Image: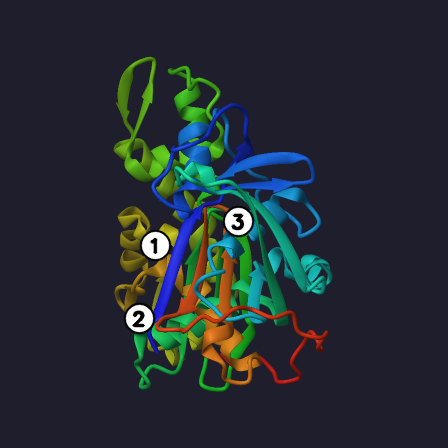
């Protein structure tokens, strides 16, 4: 079954002034209301804001989480039938802390979203949308990544493998076997943000960065250059330096601490996932360290795998109703929403309250 993914930058900023006719569609013109305040979200915030950002690894009780959650779900209204089955997750470092709070947040079931369609429609207006959650589950991010990886690579002969996910806020890792996840090998530590903050410190010694926040520097980090004082500064050499240092001081020690020689012997491959897997500097360092005894491979579309895994978990808890399933990865760099394609969407109806969890275990 084909999967469709949608993403937007995980940043927002309070909206002031006129935002009409500033975008081509809803995804690029997200403007939603929380309490009495309007917020530009995603690409609209990046274009129209001054200092768009968010709290890294925000708790479900914080406004950052709710704003991004509603902005993401607004993009599913015309793609799935309601009530929906939804899966979200957190890194291992925050999973046990935030899981209960997330379940309490999702247990509201009925969510009303105030949004402004004038950002992308000449005849738009302030509108309201409602979505209903029938079933939900909160699982570890690395579990979602492994599920997504298995569903995407379609290599049944590869049963035992190590999955490493490079995110903005955290790096996640663990070993999967034919029987399931080996929890002894699971870890969560500093993500690409570690390297970006080191780059910022270096740049601040010679350049005025115009008070750019870490999310704005992250964009420059990905592009390999930054504009400041009307000059373009090439960052490729500095990026290589801080990523090499990040691998040596963070990633390599984690691999030594959590995986034994026996683990490497029994695994067929190491898969690299997450947005950070696009950095050649990191993937080359991985390949160099493990070249003599285990293959290292960048997973296809690595930044989407967690969301895709969440989607397939939603299929499991939905009683096999693909047209009601959503996988939502509220990442620190990007928020990614996955749904199954070719769904016929009907007018939603509000269901009676149903149990919030599924007794079946998560299968990885």
Which numbered disc flags the more N-terminal residue, 3 or 2?
3
The residues tagged by marks 2 and 1 sit, at their Cα atoms, a distance apart of 18 Å
At label 1, counting other C-alpha atoms closer than 10 Å, the crowd grade (few under 14, some 14-19, many 20 or more) is many
What residue is shown at x 55% (from left), y 48% (from top)? Answer: 68
Q: Secondary structure at mark 2?
A: loop
Q: Secondary structure at mark 3?
A: helix
Residue 133: image location, x then y, percent: 62, 67
Which numbered disc flags the more N-terminal residue, 2 or 1?
1
Residue that badge 1 annotates: 277
Residue that badge 3 annotates: 71
Residue 261: image location, x then y, percent: 43, 72
In which image quadrant can residue 294 be found? Answer: bottom left
Residue that badge 2 annotates: 294
User: Nearest the camera: 152 or 322?
Assistant: 322
Q: Closer to the camera: disc 3 or disc 1?
A: 3
At label 3, counting other C-alpha atoms closer than 10 Å, the crowd grade (few under 14, some 14-19, many 20 or more) is many
Q: From the viewer's perspective, is residue 275 above or below residue 9?
A: below
């Amino acid at each position: 079954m084909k999967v469709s993914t949608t993403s937007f930058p995980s940043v927002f900023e309070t909206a002031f002034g006129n935002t009409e006719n500033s975008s081509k569609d809803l995804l690029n013109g997200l403007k939603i209301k929380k309490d009495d305040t309007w917020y530009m979200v995603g690409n609209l915030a990046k274009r129209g804001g001054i200092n768009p950002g968010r709290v890294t690894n925000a708790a479900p009780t914080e406004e950052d989480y709710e704003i991004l959650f509603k902005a993401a779900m607004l993009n599913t209204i015309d793609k799935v039938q309601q009530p929906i089955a939804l899966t979200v997750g957190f890194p291992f470092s925050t999973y046990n802390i935030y899981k209960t709070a997330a379940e309490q947040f999702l247990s509201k079931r009925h969510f009303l979203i105030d949004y402004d369609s004038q950002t992308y429609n000449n005849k738009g207006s302030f509108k309201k949308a409602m979505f209903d959650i029938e079933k939900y589950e909160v699982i570890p991010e690395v579990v979602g990544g492994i599920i997504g990886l298995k569903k995407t690579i379609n290599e049944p002969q590869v049963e035992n493998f190590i999955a490493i996910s490079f995110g903005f806020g955290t790096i996640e890792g663990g070993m999967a076997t034919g029987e399931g996840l080996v929890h002894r090998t699971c870890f969560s530590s500093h993500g690409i943000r570690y390297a970006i903050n080191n780059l910022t410190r270096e740049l601040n010694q010679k350049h005025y960065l115009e008070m750019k926040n870490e999310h704005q520097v992250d964009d420059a980090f990905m592009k390999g250059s930054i504009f400041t004082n009307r000059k373009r500064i090439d960052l490729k050499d500095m990026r290589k330096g801080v990523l090499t240092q990040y691998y040596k001081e963070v990633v390599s020690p984690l691999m030594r601490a959590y995986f034994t020689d026996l683990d490497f012997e029994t695994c067929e491959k190491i898969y690299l996932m997450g947005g950070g897997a696009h950095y050649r500097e990191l993937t080359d360092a991985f390949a160099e360290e493990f070249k003599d005894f285990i293959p290292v491979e960048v997973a296809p579309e690595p930044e989407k795998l967690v969301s895709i895994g969440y989607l397939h978990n939603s299929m499991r808890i939905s009683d096999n109703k693909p047209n009601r399933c959503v996988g939502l990865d509220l990442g620190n760099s990007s928020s990614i929403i996955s749904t199954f394609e070719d769904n016929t969407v009907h007018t939603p109806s509000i269901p009676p309250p149903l149990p919030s969890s599924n007794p079946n275990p998560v299968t990885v």
